[in-house]
Amino acid sequence: MLPYPKTIPPRAIWSVIEKLDLSLLYAQIEARDEVAGASAIDPKILLSLWVFATSEGEGSAREIQRLTELHAAYRWICGGVAVGYHTLSDFRSQQGEVIDGLITQILALLMQQDLVELSRVAQDGTRVRADAGASSFRREQTLQA
């Protein structure tokens, strides 16, 4: 029988995120209290999904959305809340550096505590097209330039 893991990564991630001051993220929500609008997904859920996905090497909002329907850990994070890829993508792009900084800090903390092991990390889900032809890699002078 295999030994039981020290902790389940999604729960460790959630526990760290619960202790953070996310007031900057909550301030971005326009529909709250007396202000009308569609109810927003809690930023803790979105941030947890991004942190967990990044720890698993996933950086595509579409793939994360798919995993929320298929993978038990992602479903646990969502807690019954349906999360669309567009919401995930907007959350990440609109908060930009704040989200990237939080993801980095949370993963660093979890790695320091030996709760998460990063063997592969996704930077983002976009593909960048190279603008170089095969002939540009043939000469040492060209490579150095």
Image (spheres, grey):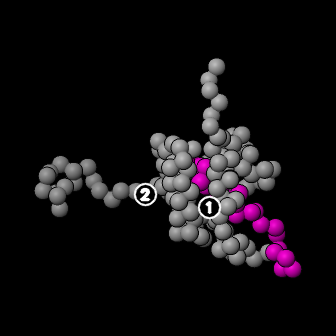
Q: Amino acid at mark 2?
A: Val
Residue at figure coordinates x 64%, y 51% from the top left: 13
Front-lying residue, 137 or 27: 27
Front-lying residue, 83 or 54: 54
The location of residue 107, given as percent across then percent down, is 54, 53
Q: Quadrant of the N terminus?
A: top right
Say which residue label 2 marks.
128
Q: Which mark is residue 41?
A: none
Q: Does label 2 or label 1 sit earlier along the sequence? A: 1
Residue at figure coordinates x 12%, y 56% from the top left: 141
Front-lying residue, 31 or 109: 109
Residue 8 as seen in the image, left or right of residue 112: right
Note whether residue 4 is visible: yes
Q: Amino acid at mark 1?
A: Ser
Above-or-below relation of 15 to 56: below
Note whether residue 70 is visible: no
The location of residue 14, given as percent across then percent down, is 68, 53
Say which residue label 1 marks.
89
Residue at figure coordinates x 75%, y 77% from the top left: 30
The number of numbered discs placed on residues in the rendered structure image is: 2
